[in-house]
Amino acid sequence: MNDLVLTGDRPTGPLHLGHYFGSLANRVRLQERFPMYVLIADYQVITDRDVPGEIRRHTTELLLDYLAVGIDPAKVTIFQHSAIPELNQLLLPFLSLVSVAELRRNPTVKDEIAHSSQSAVSGLMFTYPVHQAADILFCKGTLVPVGRDQLPHVEVTRLVARRFNERYGEVFPLPEALLGEQPLLRGLDGGKMSKSRGNAIPLSATEDETAALIRRAVTDPDRVITYDEERRPGVAGLLTLAGLCLGRSPGELAEEIGDGGAATLKRVTTEAVNEFLRPIRKRRAELGAGDVRRILAEGNARARERAVRTLEEVRVAMGF
Ligand code: ATP
Ligand code: MG
């Protein structure tokens, strides 16, 4: 099979364990088997932020996180949205292929609007999933390792690809989403772990910072620890996290902790997380910022070349 992998992240803050178990671990595995593009989605930051903020610093940090977890720039093309204007040019014809009603009913967009700090919801909030279609289709990506929140967006991409092919002739493959080991890791408040919701454990946090974060995690007054996703999301989130880091099931851990209560649960989780992240954090500390610029420049050049070719194909297919 000639599969090609595309994924990405927004440079809105340091990557966290949700990214690791939701998507990064998959990428590290897949880079050995398939050509891969990893997108630093910098334009997408302004979807729900009034200003891009410290975009350069976040971009550097994101790249360091990638390298620390084992993404290899010799195998993977790492590139930035803002370096590839052809992506914006693909957005225009793609937008004509979806209806306003389809954009409005996207459940992830609805959830993000509910958590947005912006006073007014921008047009980009409704159209960024179509921009993501351009991100995936410009390189004819076929496999997209993502967390669960991204499934509706991959559906939009499939819709765009299918309709484009129907109208203008076969140009794009239909990509498949590939869910990670933990497609929706809970954060320290029991909700989806997110950079922007203050509930995440960053891969780059120190051991002490990690301990402090987990100490503040939301649990409940029940003394005996049980694994119940529905009724005890906070406790279940910690059990899942510790379980992933230890390679054990959350139910089994719950039984072991038993009436040790939230204090024991938090101690076990802190130790498991710090142990698990130790080699990743060590690698990160050894990396220099000097490599970052070179890796991005090379990745951007490779991605741009691909995008120029696809845009030309699109224009020819459309009869321009
Ligand atoms: P933000 O709060 O800025 O939206 P985020 O934490 O949601 O940040 P993204 O950059 O939006 O991170 O997502 C990058 C990738 O990581 C996506 O594929 C997404 O599905 C996945 N991902 C993010 N959070 C989680 C999570 N808690 N569990 C599993 N996968 C996740
Ligand atoms: Mg997100």
Image (cartoon, helix red, strand yellow):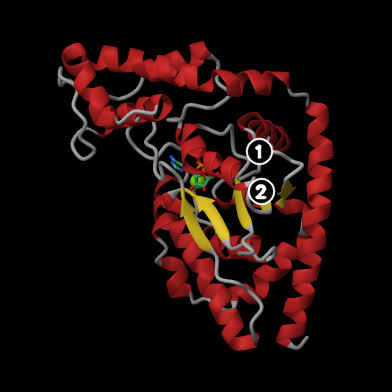
- Front residue of this view, candidates 313 and 275: 275
Residue 88: x percent and y percent? 71, 64
* Tag 2: amino acid: Val
Residue depicted at 39% across the width and 66% down the height: 105
Query: Which of the 4 image quadrants contains residue 4?
Result: bottom right
- Front residue of this view, candidates 86 and 242: 242
Q: How dense is the environment of label 1, judged by Cα within 10 Å: few (below 14), some, or many (20 and up)?
A: many
Q: How dense is the environment of label 2, judged by Cα within 10 Å: few (below 14), some, or many (20 and up)?
A: many
Q: Which mark is residue 38?
A: 2
Instruction: Specify the quadrant that holds the N terminus.
Output: bottom right
Q: Pointers 1 and 2 in contact (CB under 8 A)?
A: yes
Disc 1 marks which residue? 71
Task: Please tell me which of labels 1 and 2 falls first in the chain.
Answer: 2
In screen coordinates, is 203 left or right of 267? right
Q: Is mark 1 on a helix, strand or loop?
A: loop
* Tag 1: amino acid: Ile
Q: Is residue 244 above or below residue 85?
A: above
Residue 272: x percent and y percent? 41, 19
Residue depicted at 47% across the width and 68% down the height: 103
